[in-house]
Amino acid sequence: MIRNLTEQDKEHLQEALIKSGQKVTPQREAVFTVLLAERDHPTVDEVFHRAREVMPGLSLATVYNCLETFVGCGLVRQVNHERESTRYCPNLAPHAHFRDKETGRVHDIELPPEVLKSLRSILPPGFDSEVIEISFHGRAQAKDHHSN
Amino acid sequence: MIRNLTEQDKEHLQEALIKSGQKVTPQREAVFTVLLAERDHPTVDEVFHRAREVMPGLSLATVYNCLETFVGCGLVRQVNHERESTRYCPNLAPHAHFRDKETGRVHDIELPPEVLKSLRSILPPGFDSEVIEISFHGRAQAKDHHSN
DNA sequence: GTGAGATTTCGAATCATTCTAAGTCACAAC
DNA sequence: GTTGTGACTTAGAATGATTCGAAATCTCAC
């Protein structure tokens, strides 16, 4: 179920938006609420349908806009797997993604700092990386736990 | 320039195709030749245009088909970055990819076995991964070396 | 050389995403 | 209070990569 944002989450959203010179709008709050409510890496379409339950007039274009805005101000991450629809993830801690071949579900995999460091170390001099994406693809035993 | 396949490459192609019950055709040879000739991670469209120089009647759909076939029998790897066109890479050794923000060019980054191992070790029990994709995104000093 | 099945071809269809232009809103200036 | 400004939202059209469908062609075993 979609619950309202906690005061803390609301502040987090407001701060990030205002810091980058943008406004807090009902649509942005609704989309952000959806993202936090179920952290199952929804696609734009899934976010759209979930958000419509709460705000029926919301348009798909706005969902695209909101998500792009959030990515821009560092509130959420995009997750891409091959050419499938882009998914969105409010987990900002460094982590990898595991996509289950059977269910299509995406799980977050914690990424310990030393592993991240060893990864960075494989870059030859002169290569300066801001973003590292790590994705696994395979089978996960169905445990149906939360995927963040 | 596009040179012909070496005998060795030709055998490699034939073996892989036949092993998975498929046929060697002039189109598949042409596409494979293009992939080996310039290992700059071309998009389908780039492969298409390069291959047309050698085989003018070749169709785009066939290029898609050939590349899919090659991926299926393990001859080449797909490389995806966000939602850009899929690129193709005949380097089968374990490696990561680095995409240069400025040029869009993709470089292969060697992946030492111990780093690969440490990466695999972050998967919780029950997660079984066949494929790991690692991609960096940032700036590379323009050295214009070969990108494989 | 023939036939069965695989492959190629062209163009149409699909699907996620982006664009466009008009409409709306919040708020500041007058 | 009205007006202006700029950001935001909206619906629908446009785009671009990829896939599909159906007919024509090729390949290889017999």
Image (cartoon, coloured by chain):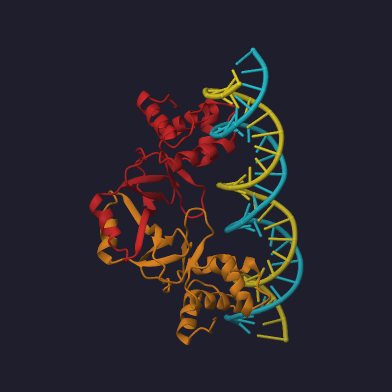
Chain colours: A red, B orange, C yellow, D cyan
- Which quadrant is the C terminus of chain A positioned in? top left
Is residue A14 visible in the rendered image? The answer is yes
Residue at far left of view: A114
Q: Indicate the position of residue B27 as horizontal and vertical percent values.
A: 60, 76
Q: Quadrant of the N terminus of chain A?
A: top left
Q: Is residue B24 visible?
A: no
- Relative to residue D28, is residue B40 depicted above or below? above
The percent coordinates of residue B55 (x first, y second) are 64, 78
Where is B8 relative to C12, above or below? Answer: below
Q: Residue at x 54, y 65 (%)?
A: B43
Q: Residue at coordinates 49% horizontally, 82% vertically from top-left?
A: B10
Between residue B143 and residue B63, name the one nearer to us. B143
For residue A126, above or below residue B84: below
Residue D10: x percent and y percent? Answer: 63, 32
Asked whether, in this view, residue B8 is left or right of residue B43, the answer is left
Identify which residue, A70 or A43, lies in the foreground.
A70
Residue at horizontal 26 percent and vertical 58 percent from the top? A118
Measuring from the top left, give residue B146's x and y in whole percent: 42, 74
